[in-house]
Image (spheres, rainbow, N blue to C red):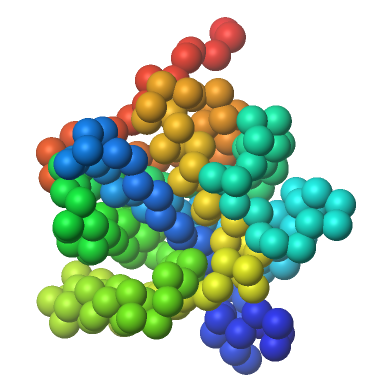
């Protein structure tokens, strides 16, 4: 990767896949909710094209990063189209019953579910949007435990990058936002994203079932 994007393995062939990852939270009640992690898996060699596609979703003159939460309904629909165009694999991991004071525990649990699935898919690198040095170190500590247990292979890298610098991460933000909305019953953007992508909702480690939104059947 060039100096503008210093987060992938340098001086190695662009082979294998990279999982672009981001998080979202959904409040079911004032004291309980769902923590979710989205992952958009693309070939390593297509990262530049993904960055270009995501950057192109910004409005003319827009400098800040694309952020689902800040976009209008019309802009979210365009973002879902942009995600669909990547023809990626989208993987969602969840942890339900999240209490207000245990968000980081819910993240650790969802992170474990996601990383184990990515390892089964032989993903070469998982790249997460940075949440700041302290929280990024907490992620690293979690995955170190998985490696010590032999569950997570040492060959899979886990890195963090600022969303403002690594535009490819915006794809994961779109996936997280669209899935979060679908959990609340607004499924149009999630359905749109899945027109070009394969979506997998992993079994929730807290309740033992996948929180799969009710998608309307397509035409036959």
Q: Quadrant of the C terminus?
A: top right
Residue 184 or residue 149, whichever sits in front? 184
Residue 147 position within the rendered picture, expressed as x and y whole percent measured from the top left: 22, 79
- Residue reaching furthest to the top: 220
Residue 154 position within the rendered picture, expressed as x and y whole percent measured from the top left: 31, 81
Residue 118, above or below 210: below
Residue drawn where x is 24% and y is 80% of the image: 141
- Residue reaching furthest to the bottom: 11
Residue 2, above or below 64: below
Q: Quadrant of residue 203?
A: top left
- Residue reaching furthest to the front: 30
Residue 220, above or below 115: above
Q: Is residue 94 left or right of residue 180?
A: left
Residue drawn where x is 17% and y is 57% of the image: 101
Residue 166 or residue 112, whichever sits in front? 166
Residue 153 or residue 176, whichever sits in front? 176
Q: Is residue 19 left or right of residue 149?
A: right
Q: Is residue 43 visible?
A: no
Residue 116, above or below 32: below
Q: Is residue 202 left or right of residue 21?
A: left
Residue 185 position within the rendered picture, expressed as x and y whole percent measured from the top left: 41, 22
Q: Is residue 183 visible?
A: yes
Residue drawn where x is 13% and y is 39% of the image: 207
Q: Quadrant of the N terminus?
A: bottom right
Residue drawn where x is 64% and y is 30% of the image: 73
Numbered circles on residues, count: 0
Residue 196 position within the rendered picture, expressed as x and y whole percent measured from the top left: 62, 36
């Amino acid at each position: 990767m060039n100096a503008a994007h210093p987060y992938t393995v340098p001086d190695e062939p662009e082979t294998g896949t990279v999982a672009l990852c981001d998080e979202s939270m959904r409040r079911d009640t004032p004291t309980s909710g769902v923590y979710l992690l989205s992952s958009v898996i693309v070939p390593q060699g297509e990262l530049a094209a993904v960055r270009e596609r995501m950057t192109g979703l910004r409005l003319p003159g827009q400098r800040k990063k694309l952020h689902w939460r800040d976009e209008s309904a019309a802009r979210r629909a365009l973002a879902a189209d942009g995600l669909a165009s990547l023809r990626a694999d989208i993987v969602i991991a969840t942890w339900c019953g999240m209490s207000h004071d245990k968000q980081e525990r819910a993240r650790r649990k969802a992170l474990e579910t996601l990383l184990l699935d990515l390892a089964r898919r032989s993903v070469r690198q998982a790249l997460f949007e940075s949440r700041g040095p302290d929280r990024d170190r907490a992620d690293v500590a979690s995955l170190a435990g998985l490696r010590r247990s032999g569950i997570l292979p040492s060959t899979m890298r886990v890195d963090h990058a600022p969303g403002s610098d690594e535009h490819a991460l915006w794809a994961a933000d779109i996936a997280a936002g669209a899935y979060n909305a679908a959990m609340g019953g607004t499924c149009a953007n999630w359905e749109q994203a899945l027109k070009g992508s394969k979506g997998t909702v992993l079994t929730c480690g807290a309740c033992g079932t996948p929180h799969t939104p009710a998608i309307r059947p397509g035409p036959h």
